[in-house]
Amino acid sequence: MNIPVVHRAILKQHVATVEAKHPIKVLGLLPRGSAAHVFEEDALDFLAEKRPGLDLLGLCEAEVDLADLLGRPVGIVLASGLKGDEAVEFPRMLDPL
């Protein structure tokens, strides 16, 4: 399967658009499969921090908005939701934006 490459500058621009609309701060990219709720091979997985006012619906809207902008599925993992080994390993695997 040929997965289109997203240029870093465009990615940053789209992330900034979503951050301006939703109370979320995207920290960077995670390896594919890190967001267990997104199954598509061409998905992008992000690690993010929630800001005051973010609820589950807002998180879902942020995923949909970013996916629409990027033209591919998106999964967002919240750092505050990581437990155990994931809380240690995910930040180490992060590719900052």
Image (cartoon, helix red, strand yellow):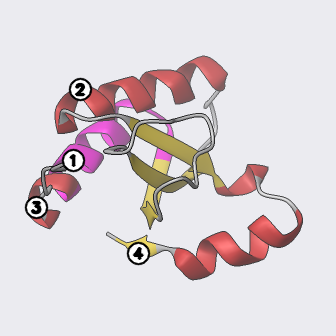
Are the residues tagged 4 and 2 within 8 Å (C-beta)? Answer: no
| Residue pointed to by mark 1 | 1
* Disc 3 from disc 4: Cα separation: 14 Å
* Disc 4 from disc 2: Cα separation: 22 Å
Q: Is residue 49 above or below residue 94?
A: above
Q: Which mark is residue 95?
A: 4
* Disc 1 from disc 3: Cα separation: 19 Å
Question: Which of the two labelled residues, at mark 2 and mark 1, occupies the earlier sequence position?
Answer: 1
Question: Where residue 30 sits in the image (x, y, percent)?
Answer: 48, 63
**Which one is in front in this view, the residue at disc 2 or the one at disc 1?**
1
When asked about the image quadrant of residue 63, the answer is top left
Check disc 1 and report its element: helix, strand or loop. Answer: loop
* Disc 2 from disc 1: Cα separation: 20 Å
Report whether 3 appears left or right of 44. Answer: left
Observer-nearest residue: 54 or 87? 87
Report whether 11 appears left or right of 79. Answer: left
| Residue pointed to by mark 2 | 68
When asked about the image quadrant of residue 69, the answer is top left
Question: Which of the two labelled residues, at mark 2 and mark 3, occupies the earlier sequence position?
Answer: 3
